[in-house]
Image (cartoon, rainbow, N blue to C red):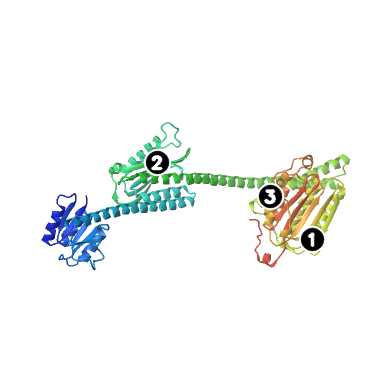
């Protein structure tokens, strides 16, 4: 059944069309003034509008244009005597010469056209709505991926639901971004305190209903549930009739992990598509909420570790200072006693004095290692950088160890490339680096074997470390002064090479236990080399020996202009 409206002031046309449609299953009406046309359009929205082209209207095209803005799909037919020069606003025509059957056929055809257009328009409208919601869903998902803040994630969820469902009110219980459970109310209009209390009780009951036969993950009551209100329009206020609105409810969870729940209210009834979208966006927020919770735990754990690190650093500084205070006079006392100024000692006395002095010196070295490592970790070690040549460092270290090597029947060699370019470094720290490496070589090299210090100029591309240090060496660019300490000692198993650079690490074998040590030497060396913008690596074969090498960049104009920090940062 369709709605047909005939617009004419010709009585003969009116009587003819009334006769044609009398008894047919159509809602047929007539009118003859402009005002009555618009009244009819408003009252029952005709599917087919038939205009007599000779009607006495001031501006018929304008009248039809206004109708078209209200009823876009309505079919406009013109009763005319000719088919030429028909107006563009017409969808068809009816000639005065048409028979009754032809008139009926023409109108029925346009009623079918109108029906098909309405169906197509409805499909397009549904598709348009679906595309809009998909776009909202995509944008909301992108927002979820862009943050690890629980409060922002919940806000993005609410915004996505608002854009796609146009809700009137939502109540969201969250346990994620406050130290206590929170009820977040997002409302189109203002709400009274009484209604807030009712919403709070309803939210608590909904929450508890999810765990009727299970343990409730978080205890919630009307006292400890904090309220956060977000009101769009405070000029109007909701009443308790909000509970008569259509509503949907869903938990916000991921497997056995529970983050909260949400209830949404809308005066207009929700469709099945609305429900599917609601569930989809609530599920989507669960995974980033889990990530946000893990991130929060990581931040808290990092804060805790930083606090422990500060405590450890302070403890080391205090203990080292307290140890140094009595050791200094003890060392001085031992020096005075061994000098003979307090009398001569027999052989046993000298033996025990020498033992005490060695142990005091060893203890001082241990304290210095701990303090150095603590400074490196805290970024507080001072470096006096200057233009220098590595030759002076090698020469000083050689002089310090030549006699030690002879005493232990170890051959000590130095091979230096002539005319090595200058570097930018701290002489004292570089001597400390090389001393540590040579000292380690002395510890682990048996008698009648050799230790060799070698210096040479190499391009970063020509440095070939073992597989454990390939990544670090690949980061180097340009020319470097490379210093190596090669020994013929016990060597290191391949799987233990990286352990040598770990703090407090000692590779388990009889010789390492015999020589002892804190296991801090190589970590300190590594930190100092890094401070010189260099790298350190090791090549070793078990029972054949080890070669520890470090590379310091050659001083260039670019390096001169670059600000090298005075402190490790």
Residue behind mark 1: 391
Judged by depth in the image, the label closer to the viewer, 1 or 2, is 2
The circle on residue 373 is: 3
The circle on residue 250 is: 2
From the top left corner, tell me how far across and down residue 46 is, in percent: 21, 55
Judged by depth in the image, the label closer to the viewer, 3 or 1, is 1
Is residue 351 left or right of 367 when viewed as pictured? right
Give the alpha-carbon distance from disc 1 to disc 2, as whole Å: 75 Å
Instruction: Mark 1: give few (<14), some (14-19) or many (20+) Cα within 10 Å.
Output: some
Is residue 566 placed above or below 174 in the rendered structure? below
Q: Is residue 214 visible?
A: yes
Give whichever of 262, 356 is nearer the camera.
Answer: 262
Give whichever of 139, 454 is nearer the camera.
Answer: 139
From the top left corner, tell me how far across and down residue 248 is, in percent: 36, 42
Is residue 233 left or right of 378 when viewed as pictured? left
From the top left corner, tell me how far across and down residue 313 is, in percent: 64, 47
Label 2 element class: strand
Kindly identify the residue that appears in the image at 26 percent across and 65 percent down.
Answer: 88
Give the alpha-carbon distance from disc 3 to disc 1, as whole Å: 26 Å
Instruction: Mark 3: give few (<14), some (14-19) or many (20+) Cα within 10 Å.
Output: many
């Amino acid at each position: 059944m369709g709605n047909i409206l005939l617009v004419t002031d010709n009585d003969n046309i009116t009587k003819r069309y009334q006769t044609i449609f009398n008894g047919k299953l159509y809602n047929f009406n007539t009118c003859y003034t402009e005002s009555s046309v618009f009244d009819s359009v408003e009252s029952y929205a005709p599917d087919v509008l038939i205009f007599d082209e000779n009607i006495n209207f001031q501006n018929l095209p304008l009248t039809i244009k206004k109708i078209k803005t209200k009823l876009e799909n309505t079919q406009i037919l013109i009763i005319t005597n000719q088919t030429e020069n028909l107006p563009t606003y017409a969808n068809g025509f009816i000639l005065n010469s048409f028979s009754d059957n032809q008139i009926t056929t023409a109108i029925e055809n346009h009623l079918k056209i109108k029906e098909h257009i309405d169906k197509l328009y409805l499909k397009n409208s549904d598709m348009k709505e679906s595309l809009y919601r998909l776009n909202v869903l995509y944008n909301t998902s992108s927002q979820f991926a862009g943050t690890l803040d629980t409060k922002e994630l919940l806000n993005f969820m609410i915004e996505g639901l608002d854009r796609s469902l146009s809700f009137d009110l939502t109540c969201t219980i969250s346990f994620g971004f406050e130290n206590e459970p929170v009820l977040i109310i997002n409302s189109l209009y203002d709400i009274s305190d009484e209604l807030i209390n009712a919403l709070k009780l309803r939210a608590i009951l909904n929450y508890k209903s999810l765990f009727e036969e299970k343990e409730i993950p978080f205890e919630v009551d009307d006292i400890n549930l904090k309220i956060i209100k977000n009101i769009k329009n405070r000029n109007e206020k909701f009443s308790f009739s909000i509970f008569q609105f259509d509503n949907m409810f869903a938990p916000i969870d991921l497997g056995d992990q529970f983050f909260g729940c949400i209830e949404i209210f809308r005066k207009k009834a929700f469709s099945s598509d609305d429900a599917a979208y609601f569930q989809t966006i609530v599920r989507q927020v669960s995974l980033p909420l889990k990530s946000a919770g893990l991130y929060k735990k990581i931040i808290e754990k990092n804060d805790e570790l930083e606090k422990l690190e500060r405590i450890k650093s302070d403890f080391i500084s205090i203990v080292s200072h307290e140890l140094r205070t009595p050791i200094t006079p003890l060392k001085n006392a031992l020096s005075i006693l061994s000098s003979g100024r307090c009398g001569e000692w027999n052989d046993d006395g000298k033996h025990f004095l020498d033992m005490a002095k060695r142990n005091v010196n060893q203890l001082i070295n241990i304290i210095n290692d701990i303090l150095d490592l603590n400074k490196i970790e805290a970024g507080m070690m001072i470096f006096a950088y200057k233009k220098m040549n590595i030759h002076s460092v090698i020469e000083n270290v050689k002089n310090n160890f030549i006699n030690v090597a002879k005493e232990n029947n170890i051959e000590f060699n130095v091979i230096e490339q002539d005319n090595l370019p200058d570097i930018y470094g701290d002489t004292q720290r570089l001597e400390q680096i090389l001393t540590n490496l040579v000292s380690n070589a002395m510890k682990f090299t048996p008698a009648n074997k050799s230790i060799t210090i070698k210096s040479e100029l190499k391009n970063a591309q020509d440095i070939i470390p073992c597989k454990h240090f390939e990544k670090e060496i690949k980061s180097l660019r340009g020319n470097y002064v490379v210093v190596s300490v090669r020994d013929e000692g016990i060597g290191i198993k391949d799987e233990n090479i990286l352990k040598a650079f770990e703090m407090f690490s000692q590779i388990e074998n009889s010789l390492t236990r015999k020589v002892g040590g804190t296991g801090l030497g190589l970590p300190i060396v590594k930190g100092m080399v890094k401070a010189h913008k260099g790298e350190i690596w090791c090549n070793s074969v078990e029972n054949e020996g080890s070669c520890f090498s470090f590379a310091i960049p050659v001083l260039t104009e670019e390096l001169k202009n670059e600000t090298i920090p005075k402190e490790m940062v």
